[in-house]
Image (tube, rainbow, N blue to C red):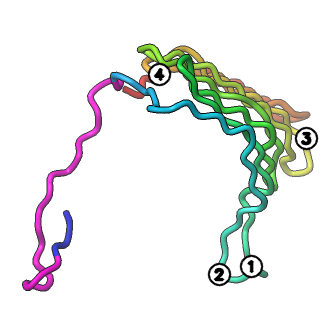
Amino acid sequence: MTWASGRDRGAKERTEQKKPSKGLPESIDLPVLVFIDRFETGRLSVGKNFDKQTAYLDHLNAAYHYDQKEHRLDLKALDTPWSNSTGSAVVGLEKPFALNTTIQTKGELEGETIEGKARLWGSLQDVQTEILLDGDDVHLSAKSTVHPF
């Protein structure tokens, strides 16, 4: 629903809502080649004033490229107050869009070092997932298949 402005203040005008897609897109191509060798940011935090902010990201260093074969994101560093991560994500351009993603992380949970790995592979039609967390007293292994379209 949208609000229309004009002579009749407060009058509502009903607009058609966009419906979610009913399947894979025909294309995920971009109209131009894209090569970003590095994009980087410092700390991102949220809070009403400087003294009471919660940091969610300490540092991000990544690269992205798109050519006629794939979209590729290289995560050189993703540092948060809880963990440090690296990895990459690649999505192919031919339907059903091959997917290969791996993220490694190392952090601390209640004073215990935890190492983790998240993998997504397959295609955008059938995404296989695997999550592993390992520490002295923490061990988690999860696998699933997700069908986002």
The residue depicted at 62 percent of the width and 23 percent of the height is: 90
| Residue at 79% across, 35% down | 86
Residue behind mark 4 = 124
| Element class at badge 3 | strand
Q: Which numbered tag is attached to residue 48? A: 2
Q: Which residues are magenta?
A: 5-25
Q: Main secondary structure of the magenta part?
A: loop
Q: Are marks 3 and 1 in contact (CB under 8 Å)?
A: no
Residue depicted at 42% across the width and 23% down the height: 147
Which residue was labeled with disc 3?
113
Seen at 51% across and 20% down, the residue is 127
Q: CA distance from mark 4 to mark 3?
A: 33 Å
Quarter of the image where one finds residue 94: top left
Question: How many marks overall?
Answer: 4
Res 22 → quadrant: top left
Please identify the quadrant where the N terminus is shown. bottom left
Above or below — where is 46 with respect to 23?
Answer: below
Find out whether the residues at labels 4 and 1 contact each other: C-beta distance under 8 Å. Answer: no
Amino acid at the residue labelled 3: Thr
Indicate the position of residue 4 as horizontal and vertical percent values: 16, 73
**Label 1 – label 2 distance at C-alpha:** 7 Å
* Disc 2 element: loop
Coordinates of residue 62 in the picture (x, y in percent): 73, 40
Determine the CA span between mark 4 and mark 1.
40 Å
The mark lying in front, picked from 4 and 1, is 4
Q: Which residue is mark 1?
A: 52
